[in-house]
Image (cartoon, rainbow, N blue to C red):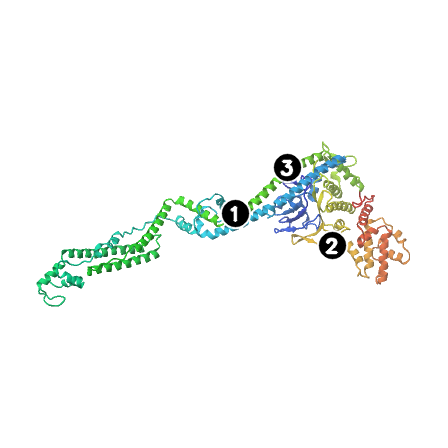
Amino acid sequence: MNQTVAQSNSVPLDRKQLQMHGGTMLENLQIAQVASYPAAGIPLNDLRAVNFLFGTNGSGKTSISRLIADANAPAHGNCTMGWKNNQPLETFVYNSNFVEHNFTPQMRGIFTLGEVAREKSEAIEQARAKVTDALTHIAQLEGTLGDAAAGTGKQGDLAALRQQFENECWTLKTTYDAAFKEAFERARVRGARAKFCDKVLEEKLGNSANLSTFAELQTRAATVYAEGVLRVALLPAFDTSELRQLGSDPILAKKVVGREDIDIAALVRKLGNSDWVRTGLDYVEKAGDPCPFCQKPLEDDLLGKLRAFFDEAYGNDMLAVGRLVDAHAIYADRCRQYLDDITENPGNFLDVAIFRVAADRLKSLLLLNAAIVERKRKEPSAPLAMESLEGAIAEIDLLLSTANEQANRHNALVDNLATEKASLSTDIWRFLIEEKKDLIDRYLSDKRGLDGAVTGISARLATLKTELQTAQEALVELERGVTSVRPAVTKINNTLASFGFNSFQLDTAGDRGQLYKIVRADGSDARDTLSEGERSFITFLYFYHLIQGSISESGTQSDRVVVFDDPVSSLDSDVLFIVSALVKRVLDEATTGTGRIKQAFVLTHNIYFHKEVTYNSRRPKGGRLSSETFWIVRKREGVSTVEKHETNPVRTSYELLWSEVRNPNRSTVTIQNVLRRILEYYFTILGNMDKDDVINRFEGRDQQVCSSLFSWINDGSHNFTDDVYVSADAETVERYLRVFKRIFDETNHQAHYAMMIGDEDPVTAAIAEVVLLADVAGTPPEPPPAMSA
């Protein structure tokens, strides 16, 4: 719908075409930061087929109608409109903008279905049924498919599954962030949940590295990711070969004794005191010196034999023992120094605590062996053996070699740092996906199921949309062949004539008769000479017939939402009834859902018009119908608000008078005057009533009561007769009420009485409404919608 012709909802062309013949209704809207509405927004929720909004001029009603007319206007950037099943309908809005845009020298013609042959009508309905069916299936599938942002349907399930998986992955990241933060930063995923999750899935599909332990990865990370990392020196070799050889020296186990061929040798062997004798000789210098053993002068012969006993061979063995003692002392000192140096400078990878224990053990063995070789020197005849150093040395060698292996690996990392970083990152991700293997597998399995469903639904939607486009094109062609602008001209002119507007009418214009113009009876242009009321009325009739058709040759049967924004402004009271009746026909169509109008909004400041259009005999007393809503629009301190009411919040003074009549606890003091005011109000609107004729239909006391009730005709609502009945008792009040009812009976307005007192049936009320309108207009009444064929 071109906005210069009618205020219709602006939606993208493809979306609008898709929804041209389907949809439901507007469920809610929020108007914010428009005109006098606050930035926080005012919501209208749970909208129904018929929605009544009452408010004074300037309260903010038109802002709502403009939002419905064009939700995509720049001024409505902060507003929202929610459609059922997310299917917007065409919107037709009557407001001041519509009048301004459409009351032009030539108005665009309204295409409607004219008299159509039965077979063509059936073909159109069948084509439209195909469109509706396709749209219904599309809406169902779109509901099943859902929306990820809204969390609905399969798309919502996918979004929820992904969100849960992201949370699990982020827990994994948090657990290992301290140890592997450099790897996460290298992959640029450390600060983003979604990217971290994507990286986990990527590595799951493509990472086949060997699995490492957390401790191994942590150790490598400490080196590879360290700042300013450098090569480290290896620990020096631990050479103990000489020290170990000393332990196998044969002199240690040899019994070092004197010559066997000396006559005293047998005695020395027998006594086993060779070492004691050898030591004693050290105290004798020459014959005659005191014997170190008996203190007698030592004979020269004995001294010679003793010296001969300890000959050159013996001396050589003792030299060997001495060399062993000296060598052990030297190598043991070197070993201890080495151990101390390593303890002081263990490098980066040696476990110092364990090494110190092993070193202390070896030092203890060295001290023990030093004592053993020293004993050999003092007791050369005693065969001795050193404590083995092999176990202690092997333990130290293992610690040193392990540390140097780690140092070599470190140096290799340093020498090839870029490659090692990449390799370490790969190994870290391999470790991480193994940690969450079950979780990842379950996620991928669930996602495959949902992806399959989404793919299937999307494919079916694509097929249905193609079928929809084909069906729409067929419908457009069928409608184009049977639509015309002439029937709408005829209907509008008939409506004008039926209500006494004979000085002007519509006629077709344009080179193809596709436009309208307003003309006088002689064919002259009447647009600029119309009164404001005439201008408003003919524009309203144009809108009324527009919502039954289209400004194009197709689309005359599209579902739509209709908005009436103060359609009775500047209208005379008689025309107000006409507009009210036409609006109520639209409301009936929206309520029943049998036509193309699926929803209607009525916004007004006119209390009587509101009363007329909201009247519905089917509405329960003190309640509302399930198909309608009531709202009050107010402006307080420059800010507009909209308040929802469970029942009709607007009551006219006329209805309030009737509520006093219906009240069983009515005042006996004021009831007479209430009855007078009702008759005054009602029969002033109807007019053309002979009050004397009505009075003459009564007799006796009832005639007197009737006369008093009609005294306002000549004298106003109050005169001297009021005082006669001021202090009425219950019996007098009952007489007044009985005469009051009979007045409506005698004037054939029983239905109005029944309607206002609350005892009418729907058919009687509908007939009464039409009769009332016909009396006002002075024209024969048409059958009400409830009574027509």
Element assignment for label 1: helix
| Residue receiving disc 2 | 623
In the rendered image, residue 275, in percent from the top left (x then y), is placed at 18, 62
In the rendered image, residue 193, in percent from the top left (x then y), is placed at 51, 49
- Mark positioned earlier in the residue sequence (3 or 1): 1
In the rendered image, residue 726, in percent from the top left (x then y), is placed at 84, 61
Residue in front for this viewpoint, 496 or 620 = 620
Sort mark 3 into few (<14), some (14-19) or many (20+) by Cα contacts within 10 Å: few
Sort mark 1 into few (<14), some (14-19) or many (20+) by Cα contacts within 10 Å: few
- Mark positioned earlier in the residue sequence (3 or 2): 3
Amino acid type, mark 1: Asp
Residue in front for this viewpoint, 312 or 133 = 312
Which residue occupies the extreme right position in the image?
A: 700
- The CA distance from mark 1 to mark 2 is 58 Å
Determine whether, in the image, residue 422 is placed left or right of residue 729. left
Residue 147 in view: no
Compared with 139, 358 (above or below) is below
Residue in front for this viewpoint, 87 or 405 = 405
Amino acid type, mark 3: Thr
Determine whether, in the image, residue 243 is placed left or right of residue 670. left
- The CA distance from mark 3 to mark 2 is 46 Å
- Mark positioned earlier in the residue sequence (1 or 2): 1
Q: Which labelled disc corresponds to residue 441?
A: 1
Q: Quadrant of residue 668?
A: bottom right
Q: Could you tell me if the residues under marks 3 and 2 are in contact, i.e. CB atoms within 8 Å? A: no
Image quadrant occupied by the N terminus = top right
Amino acid type, mark 2: Gly
